[in-house]
Amino acid sequence: MRKAVFFLLSGFTLLSCTQKVFIVRHAEKQVPGDGSMVMSKTDPPLTEAGKERAEALRERLKGEKVRTGYTTNYIRTISTLMPTANYFALDTFHYAKVDEAFLQRVRMSKGNVLVVGHSNTVDDIVNGLTGKNEVRELSDSTYNHLYIVKLKGKTAKYKLEFYGK
């Protein structure tokens, strides 16, 4: 009888846990002609404003107990993740594409998660996690959106916040 009660309570605890997935686009990147020394058109580093935004993201997430970070294998996404990754000593992983396998990996991560993507993938991540098609692709000049997807059992809801300057 005790074992049955223990397993019942354990199952209830697991179902009542809420996981937060924080999803952002990488911070501001250097572009040719902006006066910076852009080394690569396909893999540019962050601007000074982008570095400040990455720090602002860390500040915003300080109280969120983030445990895992996902980023593409680009300098700008890695650099956006790093201040938060260093603060929390995150387990960090690279992903190549947003597909069901990646979304399932995010869902199965323990604790809260930070995902850094691109203007054309943030919407896919949020929509994929929520099962809805409400978020649209970000414009090339949008860097301040922070999507927070709350996963609880089989339900998922998101809200949009803004961070940085």
Image (cartoon, rainbow, N blue to C red):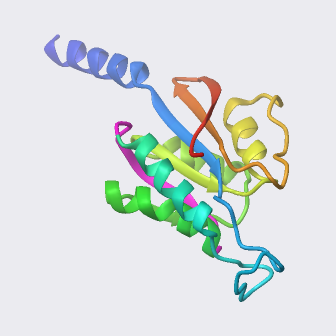
Question: Does 9 sit above or below residue 27?
Answer: above
- In this picture, is 34 found above or below 8? below
Q: Report the label total.
A: 0
Residue at image coords 72%, 73%: 30
Position in image of residue 77 (x %, y %): 61, 65
Taking the spot 71% from the left edge, 81% from the top edge, the residue there is: 36
Which image quadrant is residue 95 in? bottom right
Residue furthest front as drawn: 35
Q: Nearer the viewer, residue 51 or 10?
A: 51
Left or right, 42 with reference to 84: right
Residue 137 placement (x, y as % from top left): 84, 45
Q: Residue furthest left?
A: 2
Placement of the N terminus among the 4 image quadrants: top left
Foreground: 37 or 159?
Answer: 37
Asked if residue 110 shows in the view, the reply is no
Residue 138's place in the image compared with 52, above or below, is: above
| Magenta stretch: includes residue 67 | yes
Instruction: Between residue 115 and residue 1, name the one nearer to us.
Output: 115
Residue 164 visible in the displayed image: yes
Q: Over which residues does the magenta segment extend?
A: 63-74
Task: Tell me where residue 3 sits by quadrant.
Answer: top left
Residue 57 in the image: state x and y as whole percent: 50, 49
How far from the left and from the top, in percent, is residue 128? 73, 39
Is residue 81 magenta-colored?
A: no
Side (left or right) of 75 relative to 139:
left
For the point 46% across and 46% down, which residue is it?
109
Q: Nearer the viewer, residue 137 or 16?
A: 137
